[in-house]
């Protein structure tokens, strides 16, 4: 199974963003992971359209945009215009998830749905075929640098089974507390895409950290 790495720019140095974008461009990473937080769905505010647009201007790899915002339907089009290739909304933030995911696809992006650590994976059974990606949160969303919640492994395994039984191409992405020390276990549980923030940008050598995750 493919093994992708998506560095989370939330942990980058915002004063030297161009340097960090260049590093990701020349690394073995596959996507740029961008965390959008509204201070309502999660207890933190990150960055918005101007930053996404500037990252898009320099990035040579797809933008994987993770919306931690209430009522994301209001902004789907704007994120497409800002350059999102993958757009992920939260299960817990959508009243009409089927409509939201279908709309993301209609707009020409890949559609993702994310679940918080308390949301049973089984609730995705009737929506997973409408998603190109399921993003399992392995921390409570809102901040980088938190500890991986061990039960996430079991959740990845259950989702992998569900997706395989249905014969779907839906990818599984895992976000929060992932790094070289647990990447192998997370991939082996059935994940395809690992997000990592602190483990990459706070490492002495970010390029090596990316390689270690990718080849775990
Ligand atoms: C958390 C964000 C993550 C975060 C991951 O709410 O969705 O993408 O940046 O950071 P680390 O890898 O440091 O846990
Ligand atoms: Zn994220």
Image (cartoon, helix red, strand yellow):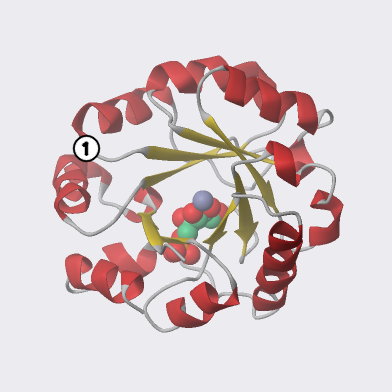
User: Would residue 120 be seen by someone viewing this image from the given angle?
Assistant: no
- The reply, left or right, for residue 162 in relation to residue 49 is right
Query: Residue 131 falls in which quadrant of the image?
Result: top right
Q: How many marks?
A: 1
Quadrant hosting residue 117: bottom right
Residue in the image at 75% along x and 43% along y: 91
Please give the name of the residue rendered at 59% of the width and 25% of the height, measured from the top-left corner. Answer: 105
Would residue 154 be found to the left or right of residue 202 on screen? Answer: right
Q: Position of residue 146 (x, y in %)?
A: 53, 69
Mark 1, other Cα within 10 Å: few <14 / some 14–19 / many ≥20: some
Q: Is residue 161 left or right of residue 195?
A: right
Query: Above or below — where is 78 with respect to 13?
Result: above
The x, y position of residue 50, in whole percent, is 35, 23
Q: Is residue 194 above or below residue 208?
A: above
**Would you say residue 99 is visible in this rendering?**
yes
Nearer to us in this view, 139 or 13? 139
> Relative to residue 108, is residue 27 drawn left or right?
left
Rendering coords of residue 79 (x, y %): 48, 23
- In which quadrant is the C terminus drawn? bottom left
Up the image or down, 39 lies above or below 31; here it is: above
Kind of element beneath mark 1:
loop
Which residue does the numbered mark 1 point to in the structure image? 60
**Mark 1: C-beta under 8 Å from nearest atom of ligand 1:** no
**What residue appears at the point 69 percent right and 25 percent down from the top-left corner?**
102
Front residue (pair 143, 95):
95
């Amino acid at each position: 199974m493919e093994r992708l790495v998506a560095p989370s720019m939330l942990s980058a140095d915002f004063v030297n963003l161009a340097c960090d974008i260049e590093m990701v461009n020349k690394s073995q990473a596959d996507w740029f992971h961008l965390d959008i937080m509204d201070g309502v769905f999660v207890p933190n505010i990150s960055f918005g359209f101007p930053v996404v647009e500037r990252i898009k201007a320099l990035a040579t790899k797809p933008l994987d945009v993770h919306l931690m915002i209430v009522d994301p339907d209001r902004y789907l089009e704007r994120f497409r215009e800002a350059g999102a290739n993958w757009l992920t909304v939260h299960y817990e933030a959508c009243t009409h998830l089927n409509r939201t995911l279908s709309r993301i696809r209609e707009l020409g992006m890949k559609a993702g749905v994310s679940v918080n650590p308390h949301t049973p994976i089984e609730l995705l059974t009737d929506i997973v075929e409408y998603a190109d990606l399921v993003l399992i949160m392995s921390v409570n969303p809102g901040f980088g640098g938190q500890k991986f919640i061990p039960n996430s492994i079991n959740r990845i395994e259950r989702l992998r089974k569900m997706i395989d039984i249905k014969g779907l191409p839906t990818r599984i992405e895992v976000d929060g507390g992932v790094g070289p020390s647990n990447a192998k276990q997370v991939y082996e549980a059935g994940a395809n895409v690992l997000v990592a923030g602190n483990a990459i940008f706070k490492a002495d050598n970010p390029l090596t950290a990316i390689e270690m995750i990718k080849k775990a």
